[in-house]
């Protein structure tokens, strides 16, 4: 999420001549009362360098985008500005074409606009307002992109180095990178000067994440290790260990911290793990870890390997994407009870997940009647939004009335039988 209502996606064909340009795109999201919709706001091409991973940090008046390009991390300044019709006319620009809703809810400009690639899921409402009606409720943002500093973050020898993951801490003071050389590097941010280098793993790092209090960082890699590091001392705090089914070898694939709902000072650690060389009925696992002891607290099995993981900003929900069927599932974070399953959301494996935010730190969030919504992306060139409808619960007043009625009935019954 670039803002509370703008998403950023990236990719491309790399240096090969695939015809798919390297770069990233910004989409604006909104909810029209029936389903989520999206429109492309900006596309920025990055030449021969494909963006393989990135992290975003909102810094007040502008955002920082740190993009992994080969062995380097390229920083971009993303400057938002409000698009004003009067300013556009003053600059001699033509008025914007009349906007019309596409049949699937994606806005288009003019009759020949291309499909934006964002799928929307209806949630059962009729008489949805038009895109123009929705746009009247908020002012439209545009973005200016400026390339800034670049730093090499991976130094693998005897092979091509590659940055695999980049993360920015919640307080915006640190950035961490990991790649093919197995070294965990921590950088001051946004200065991009190295503050620590930890020989964390013997093989390439697959994922990293900062704890919400920015005191710890977890790293997982292809050496089957999951390690939690103390950022103040630079020493190993915990090693994630669990009893694998039938002694089979499992590899951690993704890791994410999540706060405990209504307890901002407490947090959990979530991982997904897959069997190494799937044989028979071996399954992937979604796991929840105790951050104080480093012990496995709960896990749930999935019938196939998992590829992506996300935790909502308030810690209430966690979502996973699968490797083979391209399915997406959503779970309650504390119990790991599944509340939403979207089979075959994509035709290929899910490469990324992101919950739509519910806070308004960078502006008003998207209003909808859904309890949660998660965005998924895949190499099938589709971005989808999956909504969890409001689950029915008994109102508090009705529960109290029910208890009072039961107490009255029991009292009358006891009086009748003479107890």
Image (cartoon, rainbow, N blue to C red):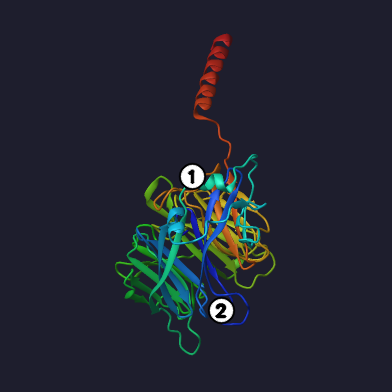
Residue at image coords 43%, 64%: 56
In-front residue for pair 186/335: 186
- As displayed, is residue 247 above or below residue 18? above
Residue 169 at x, y percent in the picture: 37, 63
- As displayed, is residue 102 above or below residue 323? above
Which residue corresponds to mark 1?
137
| Badge 1: residue crowd in 10 Å (few <14, some 14–19, many ≥20) | few
Mark found first going from the N terminus, 1 or 2: 2
Residue 336 in view, yes or no: no
Residue 82 at x, y percent in the picture: 42, 56
Q: Is residue 282 left or right of residue 267?
A: right
In-front residue for pair 147/254: 147
Residue 386 at x, y percent in the picture: 60, 52
In-front residue for pair 263/376: 376
The disc placed on residue 228 is: none
Residue 325 at x, y percent in the picture: 68, 62
Which residue corresponds to mark 2?
14
Q: Is residue 276 left or right of residue 362?
A: right
Q: Is residue 124 left or right of residue 41?
A: right
| Secondary element at image label 1 | loop
């Amino acid at each position: 999420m670039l803002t509370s209502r703008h998403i950023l996606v990236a990719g491309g064909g790399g240096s090969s001549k695939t015809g798919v340009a390297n770069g990233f795109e910004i989409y604006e999201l909104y909810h029209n009362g029936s389903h989520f919709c999206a429109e492309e706001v900006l596309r920025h091409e990055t030449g021969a360098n494909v963006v393989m991973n990135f992290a975003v940090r909102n810094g007040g008046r502008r955002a920082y985008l740190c993009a992994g390009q080969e062995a380097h991390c390229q920083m971009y300044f993303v400057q938002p500005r409000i698009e004003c019709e009067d300013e556009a006319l003053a600059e001699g620009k033509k008025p914007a074409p009349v906007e019309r809703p596409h049949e699937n809810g994606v806005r288009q400009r003019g009759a020949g606009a291309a499909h934006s690639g964002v799928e929307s899921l209806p949630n059962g409402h009729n008489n949805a307002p038009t895109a123009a009606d929705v746009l009247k409720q908020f002012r439209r943002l545009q973005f200016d992109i400026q390339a800034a500093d670049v730093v090499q973050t991976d130094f693998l020898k005897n092979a091509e180095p590659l940055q695999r993951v980049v993360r920015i801490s919640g307080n915006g003071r640190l950035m961490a990178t990991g790649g093919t050389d197995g070294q965990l590097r921590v950088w001051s941010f946004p200065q991009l000067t190295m503050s620590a280098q930890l020989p964390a793993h013997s093989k390439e790092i697959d994922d990293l994440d900062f704890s919400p209090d920015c005191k710890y960082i977890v790293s997982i890699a292809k050496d089957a290790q999951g390690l939690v590091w103390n950022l103040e001392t630079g020493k190993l705090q915990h090693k994630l260990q669990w009893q694998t089914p039938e002694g089979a070898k499992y590899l951690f694939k993704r890791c994410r911290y999540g706060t405990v709902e209504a307890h901002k000072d407490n947090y959990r650690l979530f991982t997904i793990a897959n069997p190494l060389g799937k044989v028979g009925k071996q399954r992937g696992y979604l796991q929840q870890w105790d951050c104080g002891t480093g012990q496995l607290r709960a896990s749930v099995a999935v019938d196939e390997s998992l590829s992506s993981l996300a935790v909502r900003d308030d810690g209430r929900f966690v979502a996973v994407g699968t490797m083979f069927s391209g399915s997406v599932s959503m779970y309650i974070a504390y119990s790991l009870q599944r509340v939403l399953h979207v089979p075959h959301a994509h035709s290929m494996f899910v490469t990324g997940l992101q919950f739509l935010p519910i806070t308004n730190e960078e502006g008003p969030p998207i209003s909808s009647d859904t309890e949660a919504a998660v965005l998924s992306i895949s190499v099938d060139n589709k971005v989808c939004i999956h909504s969890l409808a409001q689950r029915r619960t008994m109102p508090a007043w009705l529960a109290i009335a029910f208890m009072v009625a039961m107490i009255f009935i029991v009292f009358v019954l006891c009086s009748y039988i003479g107890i």
